[in-house]
Image: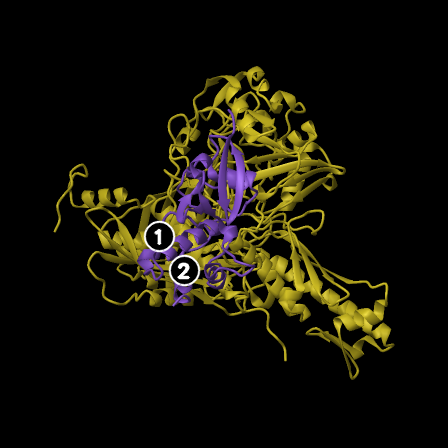
Amino acid sequence: METSWVGRSAPRDGGVDRVTGAQQYVADIHLANVLHVKLVHLNCARARIAGIDTANAARVDGVRCIMTAADLPQPVPRYGPVREDRPVLAVGETKFFGEPVAAVAAETEDAAEAAAALIGVDHEELPAVLSVDAALDPAAPLVQDPALRANDPLAQTNLLGEWRFTWGEPADARADCIVENDYSFPMVTHFAIEPHGFLAAPDPEGVTIWSPIQHPYILQRVVASALGWPVSRVRVIAPDPGGGFGGKGWPKFEPLMAFLALRTGRPVRLVLTLEETFQQVRRTSARAHVRTGFDLAGRLVFQDIHADFLVGAYADIGGRVVSKAGYAACGPYRTPHARITARAVLSHTTPSTAFRGFGTPQASWAVESQLNAAAAKLGIDPVEIRLRNVPARGEAFIPGETPADGEWDSALRHAAREIGWQEPLARRRGRGISLGVKSSATASASFALVRLHYDGSASVLSGTSDMGQGARTVLKQIAAQELGIPLERIAVVMGDTSVVPFDSSTSASRSTVFMGNAIVKACRDIKDTLQRMAAETFAVGEDAVTAANGYVRVGGRELTYDQLLKSHFGPPRGEVIGIGQERNPFVADHPLGGKPAFWELMCAAAEVEVDPDTGMVQITRLALVSDIGKALNPQQVEAQDEGAAVMGLGHTFMEQLLLDDHGRIRNLGALDYRIPTIQDVPSSLHSVLIENADGPGPYGAKGAGEGGTLAIAAAVGAAVNQAAGVEIRDLPLTPERVWRAICEREGAPATTVARRS
Amino acid sequence: MSAIPIALRVNGRGHALDVRPHHTLLEVLRDQIGLTGTKECCSEGECGACTVLLDGRAVTSCLVLAVEAEGADVVTIEGLAAGGRLDRLQQSFIDAGAVQCGFCIPGMIVAAKYLLTTNPHPTVDEIQNGLSGNLCRCGGYSRIIDAVASAARSDR
């Protein structure tokens, strides 16, 4: 009988190592003869560097190398995944708080730290651009040197990019009910529990980099480009990240570490503090002005969305975040007329990067809150108004685009039912619901190798990174299913560009679909070869042979894989190598360079209780429904949805990076920047998976894991608004913000504490 | 700065070490003894990733100077699995699906170990209270609560 390895909650691969402390994260790797690196940055965002005095630092015992921009090839190499705009070390001017101006490598961490503190940087602080308004002021200084933006029509502005998407005739559309509001979404940081760390060492072929990078092949390309080398000379070893969430997607200090390793001729090691990590990665903050038109039945007539995203000083992947979020900003709704403008605004702040949801949480907050406002205005239930606008399966809700690929109305009904939507509300309570849809990976490619060894066991070689989502486990389950080999006889090898074949990235919830399909194809390649082998070995036609479930059948004979391999190869032994690739082609004239492979859809429904005296919000019920096609490992999918939801509660209730006038992060570190703790989770959280096997991945799977971040804020926001009788359009919903809104509603000055019964 | 000699028992094994006066117990465990299972994140006692047992009490080892631990008995995550057999908490974390990236898990499990030592059958509230100093960013915490509750039940 056929065993099904997929659809079951196989225990996490690497789980035992993670509970015993044996798992090696990047900071746990010990390299002999290593030098410790400490970076030097200024205590402000933007400054002109007049000179750097390293004399005192150089005298510290154990210091082996002090590097400034002057010690690098000239002009100083610049790097980045899309635009090569970030210098390896600051050249002439720092652009954000935390941009390194020098690096020290020493025999001990203590020596590196002591020397770094002795480096004198003669500098003059310059006015910094820290907000959208400041950046767009015609008198604002340009964050990026126009000379570095040749052929860029926006070079003389602080816009990194501007994307416009229009369909229908938004200018002429007439609506019965128009809702128009401004929304804001805070600057938040990833706060992976593992701070970023990097190792580099010269090797006979070139250089080896160790980084908990989500996309090893992008890192390899970027480092090679900074060095001016072929990619074959750069080896990237990517230990499993201790949490990524997009923050470990794109190169940070790896190019600098490569230069340090090559200059010193020794391995070098840099593990950032959490504070330094905060200074290197964040989500874009955003503000949106939205006009939304409806007919009297609550059907959308138009959406007119203008969203400004504050990206940082360098592009990183910020432009892609903004264009992709902008493209799908209208949400999972049929919108006859749409006008969307999404701008990426440069500033003297930490370069914003990918962060779970990739810009969509920011857009969703605005667009979904608009639906809730319209529902109230039109007297239509918030579930009902969504049901009237959500597309049916197969309907292209963005003209010409990948159509709706699930039964999204049932996600709404499910979520509403889970929290008792129709039940009477208790005092001080409110309920809210929201959908969120994210465009998945567009043009991208995954290659996989599967090696069937002579004893019938197998190795899967994959460029995916397992950052906690459980990719190792799921990819192993897929190989087990395809080959008919038990899990314990399969090894999944990841994280070394000298071993695993090319993969675009571990992002956009794409690995199960893209890498999963590549592995399926590699396994089928193996079975084809086995069939040919068996035909040859037993001198029969190939059509007389079948290979399935761990056996090859030739006529009446049944052989296990290892029996066939032994009889085919004989004593010298050998193996069968299967190759698979899954690609979504690049489409030059598509706004995103290709159609999304699938839509990641999440519905969140929340019930909250608000304490009017304190503005404290307690979530009494929270339901998450995701449309995932097929759960290859249900426990892992649910855990991902829950984790994404709780992360969403962070930006909904408490998280925001605050800057002072010098562009410094005021709440730098775990004491002052709060993320949800075990005491902040809802007492009742239900995750429901809709499985219709309608995705493009193996066995009908779609990607998952980001959805929870998309819909939480608007669902919770609507519930808070209903419970407290307020309308708040700025996140996070801190107790103070909620309390002030209540005071304002009651006409009481928020400076006095009103007594309420 | 001269080194200071200290004696320390870690996971039942004695160590005579020369430590720098400003080095934390966390640094000495990881860098001098080579026990890297204990993790460093915030370095200010807020995240709990570096939790170890110091004379039976859970402490954030980033806030304990190594010299303060002179003569102490320390248990780290590496000391929980006896004779290759996982502690019931370690097994229940795996079974409950509470382990994702895993970086917070050593500290989380050691904190839970302390909780169950002091309160063998905690309520959900007590579990939340006991682990309130341990941050996880991957999961929704509910599986961690389930894992601790399940380990406690298996003790009955």
Foreground pick, B36 / A392: B36
Chain of the residue under label 1: B
Q: CA distance from mark 2 to mark 1?
A: 11 Å
* Chain B: colour as depicted: purple
Density class for disc 1 (Cα within 10 Å; few <14, some 14-19, many ≥20) is many
Foreground pick, B2 / A74: B2
x%, y% of residue A433? 34, 58
Q: Is residue A497 visible?
A: yes
Say what amino acid the circle numbered 1 marks: Gly
Q: Is residue A738 left or right of residue A75?
A: left
Q: Is residue A565 left or right of residue A520?
A: right
Foreground pick, B120 / B139: B120
Query: In this figure, which colouring scheme has been used for the structure?
Result: by chain
Density class for disc 2 (Cα within 10 Å; few <14, some 14-19, many ≥20) is many
**Does residue A245 sit above or below B23 in this rendering?**
below
* Chain A: colour as depicted: yellow
Q: Is residue A695 left or right of residue A567?
A: left
Which quadrant is the N terminus of chain A positioned in? bottom right
Residue at image point 62% right, 51% down: A443
x%, y% of residue A332? 44, 57
Q: Which residue is mark 1?
A: B130
x%, y% of residue A604? 38, 59
The answer to the question of whether label 2 and label 1 lie on touching residues, with beta carbons closer than 8 A, is: yes
Q: Which residue is mark 2?
A: B148
Q: Secondary structure at mark 2?
A: helix
**Residue A361: numbered disc:** none
* Callout 2 and callout 1 share a chain: yes
